[in-house]
Amino acid sequence: MDTDYARVASAIAYLTEHRDEQPSLDRLAASIGLSPFHFQRTFRKYAGVTPKQFLAALTLESAKTLLSRDVSVADAALDVGLSGSSRLHDHFVSIEAMSPGEYKSRGEGLRVTYGFTQTPFGLMLVATTTRGIAMLEFIESAHFDPNITEFPRAQFTRDDSVADRLAPRIFGETKSAPIRVHVRGTNFQLRVWNALLNVPEGAVRTYGQLAASMGEPDSARAVGNALAHNPVALLIPCHRVIAANGVVGNYKWGSGRKRGLLAWEAARAG
């Protein structure tokens, strides 16, 4: 594992755990054994924001949770600075559903290229077809089992350079052509995933709010189930959905990572 990446990942975990203590730059740098100057430069290289910006966003997220005790969820979640100045994605993401024939054949004849790359939020697996990104997962080790995918009969080729090239586009570090995702889902799941694309970076929605935006105000539980089946992390931004009481809640790839992603996006959104 890249040493600097591991240090930044540790710093993010430390910031998340100790955010209420407002640790100084010197203290953060010391926690991972770097000088303040080297730490600041390394953190920004990997996370895209300074430690101070990241901590400010974490603090804002904490304030939102506290405010939710006395203020309506909509006001508490959206009126604490997460949405007013937020910008849309640097890139446009579109969802292309797999055809029934592709699913029935379990990917027979489909060519899938997959690879692994390090990110500020952990090791990431990316699998692509000629029609887009089919899987994007945060994982603990560089292991991939085609049998757990929707297309176990496809032809799989490992090429980590594909994941390395896609990462800057996925994290909005470079301007690029629209990103397509090629996924399978029920009609309802596809509607939920498409609705998520309308939630701006730096903003959050509750399950109920997302359901209402789809014209399905009584389907908050079904929305949660659809989020749990999202095969493409980050690009289909299920991390932007929180519980009705303002709590960040569960996340397929870990609640700690979810808090980190929300703070990172809030910092980027200004």
Image (tube, rainbow, N blue to C red):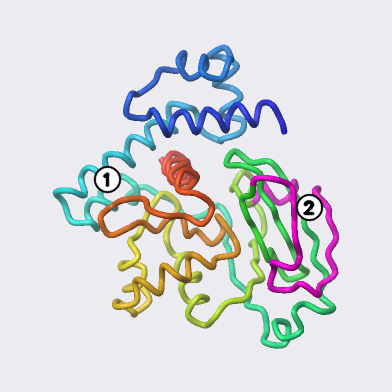
In the rendered view, tell whether residue 20 sits above or below residue 188. above
Packing grade of label 2 (10 A; few <14, some 14-19, many >=20) is some
Which residue corresponds to the image point at 77% horizontal and 57% vertical from the top-left?
Answer: 114
Residue at 74% from the left image edge and 79% from the top image edge: 106
Total tally of numbered discs in the picture: 2
Residue at the location (52% across, 28% down)?
Answer: 11
Left or right placement of residue 124 versus residue 30 in this view? right
- Say if the magenta span includes residue 113: no
Q: Which residues are magenta?
A: 140-169
Q: Is residue 8 left or right of residue 68?
A: right
Residue 162's disc is 2
Question: Which kind of residue does numbered mark 2 sit on?
Answer: Val
Residue projecting furthest to the left:
70
Q: Residue 246 in the image: state x and y as whole percent.
A: 28, 52
Q: Judging from the image, what secondary structure is the residue with disc 1 in? A: helix
Q: Say whether residue 164 is magenta.
A: yes
Q: Is residue 135 left or right of residue 8?
A: right
Q: Position of residue 57 (x, y in %)?
A: 38, 37
For residue 210, which quarter of the picture?
Answer: bottom left
Closest to the observer: 64 or 148? 148
Q: Quadrant of the C terminus?
A: top left
Residue type, label 1: Thr
Q: Image height check: is 227 above or below 117?
A: below
- For the residues marked 2 and 1, what is the alpha-carbon distance in whole angstroms? 39 Å
- Which label is found at residue 65? 1
Direction from residue 223 to residue 129 in the image, left or right: right
Disc 2 + disc 1, Cβ < 8 Å: no
Where residue 199 is drawn, which disc sits there?
none
Closer to the chain start, of discs 2 and 1, is 1
Q: Secondary structure at mark 2?
A: helix
